[in-house]
Image: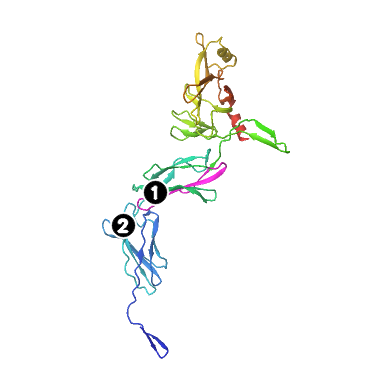
Amino acid sequence: MVILTAGRLFVLLKRGVMRVAQPVLYIIPSFDAAVGANINFAYEGEQVFANELVIYDNETGSQVYSQKTEWMRTYHTINGGELQNGKYYYCKLRVFNKAGEPSSWSSQKSFRCFTTPQFEFSNVTTGQIVQSSELTVKLSYRQAEHEPLNTYTVGLYNANHVLVRKSETRYGVDLLEYTLKNLEDGTQYYLRAVGDTLNGMTADTGFVPFSVKFITPNYWTYVDLSDNHDGTVRVSCNIRTVTGRLDGGGNPEYIHDNHMVDLRKPGQRVLFDDGFTVQGNFTIKLLGYGFVVGEKIMELIDKSNNTLSLTYREGWAATNSIMGSAAITNKACIATDDIMGVKIGYIDVRCESESHSLVYTIHSTAMPVLTDGEEYLIQLRRIGEVCEIKVDKRNIAAVIEAQNL
């Protein structure tokens, strides 16, 4: 009550109790009881000097926790080990002013306790070196109480943990994978996936570092120089990089210090389906060994559906034939037989148009027999309308050393 008399101000306070305002509990996400959590609340009124939280077992209604904390913060801390995972609880909270007067109890809020989920990348390890500009990451999710994963995102970060790009929100009921594209050569990155469970618990892989280092092939090419007639020279070099991708399921297995990929599992192959044309002049060089008889080593299919394929074959040649005598001279015989002659390996080259009306086939000479630590160098050249195939052998260690120079 306020009374104004003769220029003086009198304030009369009515005797009685001043009621402390009621706090409001925020929604409580699920948390790991072994870790604990902060229970947040909102409050508008006198300064808070303490708060009290009481928790009940939702199934039995029995009180399992009661704690009064004397501080001015608007949250209550539950320490690890005071509750149990797999349980469903509800709680209420009140606050106290400086005089120790309590507010009324807040409305009840329920929550669940679950064991922290195990959320991790299944095909990316710490410090892994990725040798292409594209990587499909796969994730695994496990949770002891079978709490399902609801949504998640995958983030790509630079070396300073600054977000480069992030996936759209993905759902846990789908296949847990995401494809990263346009990775830069010679760059270190971090991967991190963060998700939410059905009851609001966080699943986090943490930051997983990896590096990108493209495989740098050795190649030779002609350089074309032309005079611009103004004191300058134009240098032209027609080189195109074609990136391959693994097809046939599973993950690529790299051998020989990550310089070679093992494609000997049934159905596995590398597809080069963009960035080239079968038409015109070109040179292709392949390094490899352990080819399967009758299997295509390489097949090129351009946008016009012209195809060019290389297939490894083995066969018998008479000892007095050109192929047989050359194999004997060059010690390229897989086996010999008095009747059949000599058994050799060779590469069959087949070019074919989309309509199959134009077919062109040639084959290499007998392939030399490899010894331990050696591989084949296969060179295919097309000049005009003519193809030529040449097969030699190289020492694997020497090739790797040359690549690292």
Relative vertical location of residue 396 with respect to residue 335 in this rendering, above or below: below
**Residue 300 left/right relative to 67:** right
Would you call the spot at circle 1 few (<14 residues within 10 Å), some (14-19), or many (20 or more)?
some
Residue 38 lies, in percent from the top left, at 40, 60
* Residue toward you, 10 or 48: 10
Q: CA distance from mark 2 to mark 1?
A: 24 Å
Q: Which residue is mark 2?
A: 89
Secondary structure type for disc 2: strand
Q: Amino acid at mark 2?
A: Tyr
Q: Is residue 209 left or right of residue 76?
A: right
Instruction: Report which residue position mark 1 lands on.
Output: 151
Residue at 44 percent of width and 29 percent of height: 267
- Residue at left offset 38%, top offset 64%: 41
Q: Is residue 128 inside the magenta stretch? A: no
Q: Magenta region, mostly helix, strand or loop? A: strand
State which region is magenta. Answer: 183-210
Which scheme is used to colour this image of the protein? rainbow
